[in-house]
Amino acid sequence: MGLTDQQIERYARQIIVPGFGGAGQERLLSSRLMLAGTARDIASPLAYMVGAGVGEILLQLPPSDSGEQNSLITLAARLNSEVVVKPAPEEIAPLSLMLAIGAESGSGELVSRLRLVATGVPTIFCRANEPGRVAILPGAPPCLLCADADLLGPPKERGNNAGFIAMVATTEAFKLLAGLTAAAVPMLLEFTGFACVSRELRQRESGRSCGCGR
Ligand SMILES: [Zn+2]
């Protein structure tokens, strides 16, 4: 594809990062990301992804936030007109990555939508509660449904550091989209106070099979 002079200038700050380069930028520009969460939770991640030059971003907001959707799209167009931001259509494939942020009790309806698209799509899922958790699922198995952590459990209260946890998830999504993590493994990051503990995620042994491993 190749980058134009204008693109090189616009994205210079990240192109000069070792391991990123022009190839990483080209990968971002040809990516299709689904960003799911409440307007409050996805506003900053959206601004970051639009600024970074992710080619196409599909927004999946809960119906209660449909009013805020247009202003998010307008802001994004002002920030970087090269990026297409639009509401997620019924048919979302092909998708490079799903970045979902659930912090509040209102995100329960969102989780039920995520269940439908979760299998087979590389996913970063963030529960910005207390403790904050970020699941990195580069490719099933495991998927959001069958990972051995209760990722889709009932909604909890928003954590004090919800914004920070959401940005950690955004950075992980950025790394996956740009191909900065060559051999990414499924991981769970858990934030308690100032500590971050990580462990590898595996497929749950018991329970129903989601079919993502086929
Ligand atoms: Zn699965």
Image (spheres, rainbow, N blue to C red):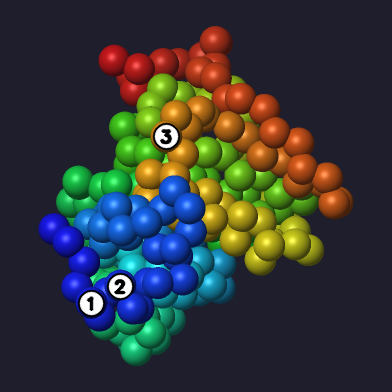
Provide the residue designation for mark 2: 8
Q: Where is residue 186 in the image (x, y as percent from the top left)?
A: 52, 29
Left or right: 28, with 141 as reference point: left
Q: Quadrant of the C terminus?
A: top left
Q: Which of 89 and 46 is in front in this view?
A: 46
Say which quarter of the image contains residue 135: top right
Q: Position of residue 43 (x, y in %)?
A: 50, 74
Work out whether mark 3 precedes mark 1 in sequence or the reverse, and give the earlier one: 1
Badge 2 element = helix
Residue 168's place in the image compared with 69, above or below, is: above
Say which quarter of the image contains residue 199: top right
Q: Residue at x 77, y 43 (%)?
A: 196
Kindly give the residue lying farthest to the right in the view shown.
193
Q: Which residue is drawn at 78% across and 63% down?
A: 160
Left or right: 8, with 142 as reference point: left
Look at label 3 and name its amino acid: Ala
Look at label 1 and name its amino acid: Asp
Badge 1 element = helix
Provide the residue designation for mark 1: 5
Kindly give the residue lying farthest to the left in the view shown.
1
- Crowd band around label 1 with a 10 angstrom C-alpha radius: few (<14), some (14–19), many (20+): few
Q: Residue at x 61, y 25 (%)?
A: 200
The answer to whether the residues at label 1 and label 2 have Cβ atoms under 8 Å apart is yes
Look at label 2 and name its amino acid: Ile
Provide the residue designation for mark 3: 182
Residue 200's place in the image compared with 129, above or below, is: above
